[in-house]
Image (tube, grey):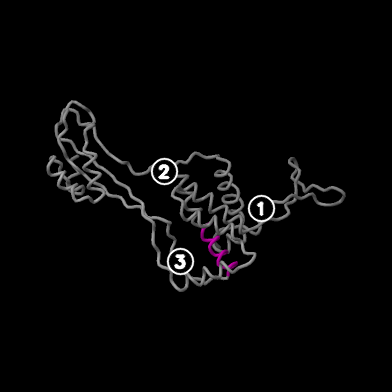
Amino acid sequence: MLRECDLILKDEAGTQVRRAIYVESRRMPRRVPLTPDAVQDVSRILSSDGAPRLPLCWYRYALDRRLVPEQFVFQWLAFEGLAGDADIPSRCPKCREVLHHCETEVTHRGSNKIAAREIFRAANPDTTESEFNVRIWGDARNSVFHGQKYPEPEYLAELASLTSLLSKAASEQIIKLFRLTQRETPRLRCDEENLMCLFIQWRTGDARLRYAADWPERVLQQIAMEDPEGIAAASREGIDLLNYNTDSPEW
């Protein structure tokens, strides 16, 4: 979950010449040309009465999230919404037998686990019923929505893998319900992030400092924003732009 650092300095106390890595991040709206097939799909979605629009909304949200837990949450909301609700028998918490009252089963309205399992296994046939019940509907779902696990890297990797399987299941069900064309579609976020990394060298005003606080922020921002004055300013102020691939191993 660690994002890019804005600035990387090293403890180089006693050295006049310092180096740093400066990272500028910019997000731009992504412009995606609509193909005739995409226009046809959009028209079919908008004209479908009674189709599950809310799960489609959650599905779009999942594709645009950046953090793995958020991707899983919205993908699960889409998946569970597509499965719908069902009357679930209420069971005794001790013996697990179905409860009856006046010779009638006591039920409550809840998520349709059986339909969800069928949707998931239709897209992921290698998953057994037992694996779905325990690993996906049980462990994965509860660990995220009940906050039962700390987001260690191994756990996030597992969630990312399961999110991919859920996304596939939700996608195929959406295609089926909206009667869309079965084809490979790009999955793109609403915006794209461009990173500019500058590896620089300059002379600090106080060599005694462990971390040079006088790094040339203004000039680096100009260069990152592609201001023509930035390169000229760097040259005037003795700031060298280094090649990270060739100059960083000894740093």
Q: In which quarter of the image is residue 52?
A: bottom right
CA gap, disc 1 and disc 3:
29 Å
Q: Earlier in the sequence, mark 1 or mark 3?
A: 1
| Marking on residue 111 | 1
Q: Is 24 covered by the magenta stretch? A: no
CA gap, disc 2 and disc 1:
31 Å
Q: Which of 54 and 134 is in front in this view?
A: 54
Q: Please rate how many residues cluster around mark 2, counting C-alpha atoms within 10 Å: few if below 14, some from 14 to 19, many from 20.
A: few
Q: Is residue 53 above or below residue 195?
A: below
Dot 3 corresponds to which residue? 185
Q: Is mark 1 on a helix, strand or loop?
A: strand
Amino acid type indicated by mark 3: Thr
Q: In this view, does 109 lie above or below 183?
A: above
Q: Earlier in the sequence, mark 3 or mark 2?
A: 2
CA gap, disc 3 and disc 2:
27 Å
User: Magenta span covers which residues?
Assistant: 166-178
Q: Quadrant of the N terminus?
A: top left
x then y, percent, for residue 195: 30, 50
The answer to whether the residue labelled 3 contacts the one labelled 2, judged by CB atoms less than 8 Å apart, is no
Q: Quadrant of residue 125?
A: bottom right
x then y, percent, for residue 56: 56, 59
Q: What element carries label 3?
A: loop
x then y, percent, for residue 223: 22, 47
| Marking on residue 206 | none
